[in-house]
Amino acid sequence: MEINDIKKEYTKKINGRFKKNKNIILDSFIEFYGEEYRSIITDRLNDISFLYYINDFTIFYLVDNLKNENNDKFKNIFFSIPYIVYLIKNGLYKKDITQNNFYELGINKIVGSSDDELLNDKELLKYSIAIALREDNESPYEVNIPIDGDIKRIIALPIFSVDDEDLFHEINHAICSEFVMKNGESIIKCGLNYSNDEKKYVTEIINDITSLEIYNIFKSKCSNVIYDDNIMSDVFTDPYKNYQNLIKEFYELNKDRIKASIIDDSAFQIKKDELKTLSKLIQYQINKI
């Protein structure tokens, strides 16, 4: 099988599974946030574009472990071996990124997308390559690109390093992102986090908690699996799960206020002092490690 055929086959599989489950995903988010947000959730879910790529760490892990072909852990990814070999033989693996090789590395590391525009539009392709080659590209990543007064919601998913919990986590980020006016400036709000403020840890932990609840709603509606090839689950761990207990009580006591605040800026009800206190508490615990 040719390299491009391998990429197309993987992209077709994941896009097909997402399309098949999209209505159940939509219903799960609406059930969690409330029927009054159906229009917002529907529009934002429809706006999401997925970008699939492979990172060097995963390639290294595969090279080191694929010799054991009897391991069930790798049964869903054997189709990719020619692709991995191609990247290595052509010097596209563990290579420093420069201005000269940026395009070549990016094009080869990108596997596919749910949105042809990400790879066909010249400017969006630059964004896509930069996302795939970013320094911390071992983890899924949601990015909001401002375009013509609107948001291009892109979820970057490293193949073989993501599962359905990760998917719901990033979709939750995308659905809870919007343009807002703050101090006379148009900025992007993501959950409880406004651009350039210091509430990232609180936002991430609350997103962990809420997205897991939404994922559990999804699982109660069906037994479908979108990603069944996460071979890195015992290598990469969620850094925020260790701190959920720090804000769990606050979350349970203020759940309705939090849900309204993260999905809709006009319904924002969480006070700055509350967020600042939580942020300091989490930062203190992180600094102790």
Image (cartoon, rainbow, N blue to C red):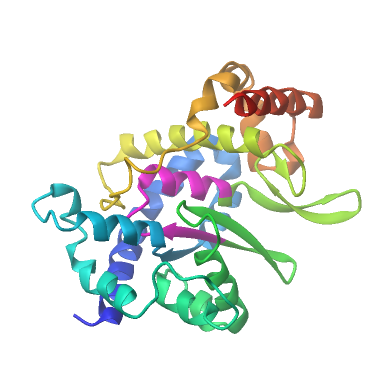
For the magenta stretch, what is the residue range?
Answer: 154-173
Q: In the rendering, at what x and y percent does residue 285 appear?
A: 62, 23
Task: Kindly identify the residue that appears in the image at 23 percent across and 82 percent down.
Answer: 2
User: In the image, is residue 169 above or below residue 11?
Assistant: above
User: In the image, is residue 43 above or below residue 280?
Assistant: below
Which residue, as the protein is rendered here, is positioned at the far left?
Answer: 70
Residue 162 counted in the magenta span: yes
Task: Kindly identify the residue that appears in the image at 70 percent across and 28 percent down.
Answer: 279
Which residue, as the protein is rendered here, is positioned at the far right?
Answer: 184
User: In the image, is residue 289 above or below residue 54?
Assistant: above
Say which of 98 and 238 sits in front. 98
Q: In the rendering, at what x and y percent does residue 272 appear?
A: 80, 29
To which quarter of the image does residue 253 belong?
top right
The reply, left or right, for residue 166 in relation to residue 143 is: left
Quarter of the image where the N terminus is located: bottom left
Say which of 219 and 185 sits in front. 185
Q: In the rendering, at what x and y percent does residue 24 appear?
A: 37, 47
Count up the numbered dots. 0
Task: Kindly identify the residue that appears in the image at 28 percent across and 65 percent down.
Answer: 13
To which quarter of the image does residue 52 belong?
bottom left
Quarter of the image where the C terminus is located: top right
Q: In the rendering, at what x and y percent does residue 145 appear?
A: 65, 64
Observer able to see residue 239: yes
User: In the image, is residue 151 above or below residue 249?
Assistant: below
Observer able to see residue 9: no
Task: Kindly identify the residue that appears in the image at 57 percent across and 69 percent down.
Answer: 130
Residue 195 counted in the magenta span: no
